[in-house]
Structures are given as structure tokens and as C-alpha cells.
Image (spheres, rainbow, N blue to C red):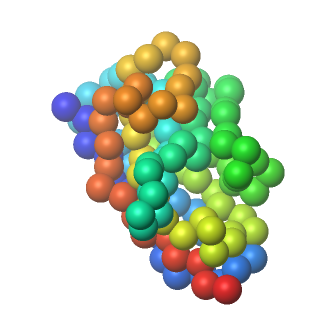
Amino acid sequence: QVQLVESGGGLVQAGGSLRLSCARSGRTSSTYVMGWFRQAPGKEREFVACINRSGSSTWYADSVKGRFTISRDNAKNTVYLQTNSLQPEDTAVYYCAASRISGWSSRSDSYDYWGQGTQVTVSS
């Protein structure tokens, strides 16, 4: 089994930054496509970004492109989401997810393991 634990969320003013982390444990000999999703109150969970197994390729939702950066450190079994220029509409619970697919995906049903989420709140 794979366990994912997110950290780094919090309250920040508009224009600020946060660095989210997701630590993976269990079956650390395997690598996974890693993704970040978010869910705002009353809305469906949406794709934010993902990164391939080696870290050589990344994909982003249009809403965060140019502001957020996903990265990974396979030696530490950790994936990061650097969030810059945060806006109130970025307020959500941010979830880390791991997928066994070989390519990449923005679909939440492509991901096999999920963390519990970390709250990001952006005040105006």
C-alpha cells in the first residue's frame, strides 16, 4: 500500500505563496505519476498539476499555469507544489495523488492513492 501525507497549507494573503509537500511511504521502491488536485467548497475536485515518474515532464491546469510549479524528489519520495501569486479563487483543500499509469492524466479516476488533503485559504 501507498500512503500520502500532504503538508504546507495555511492562510495567506492574495499575492502570497505557499509550498505544499506530499510525502509518500509504502512501496517506495516503485515510482508513480504524481498529481495535485483541489476541491473548493461546493465544487467538484479539479486537476491542478501532475508530473511524470522521472520528473522530466509536467502538466498544469490553465488556471494555474505560470503561477504554480510541481516538482519531485524521488530520493525523498516527495512531490512539491510551489504556489505563487495566490488568489482567493485558489482557496481549496489540496490533495496529492499517485497513479500507476505510464503516461500522465488530469482525470481523478486515473489515480490510485490519495492523501487526506491540506487546506489553502487565500484572503483578499
- For the point 68% across and 26% down, the residue is 56
Seen from the viewer's position, the closer of residues 35 and 28 is 35
Pinpoint residue 116: horizontal percent, then vertical percent. 29, 55
Please state if 54 lies on the left or on the right of 98 as rendered.
right
Dividing the picture into quadrants, the one containing residue 117 is: bottom left
Rendered position, 61 above or below 44: above
- For the point 62% across and 68% down, the residue is 89
Pinpoint residue 100: horizontal percent, then vertical percent. 38, 20
Quarter of the figure that contains the N terminus: top left
Residue 74 is at least partly visible in this image: no
Rendered position, 45 above or below 58: below
Pinpoint residue 74: horizontal percent, then vertical percent. 49, 34
Pinpoint residue 73: horizontal percent, then vertical percent. 54, 40
Residue 121 is at least partly visible in this image: yes
Seen from the viewer's position, the closer of residues 8 and 111 is 111
Quarter of the figure that contains the C terminus: bottom right
Seen from the viewer's position, the closer of residues 107 and 119 is 107
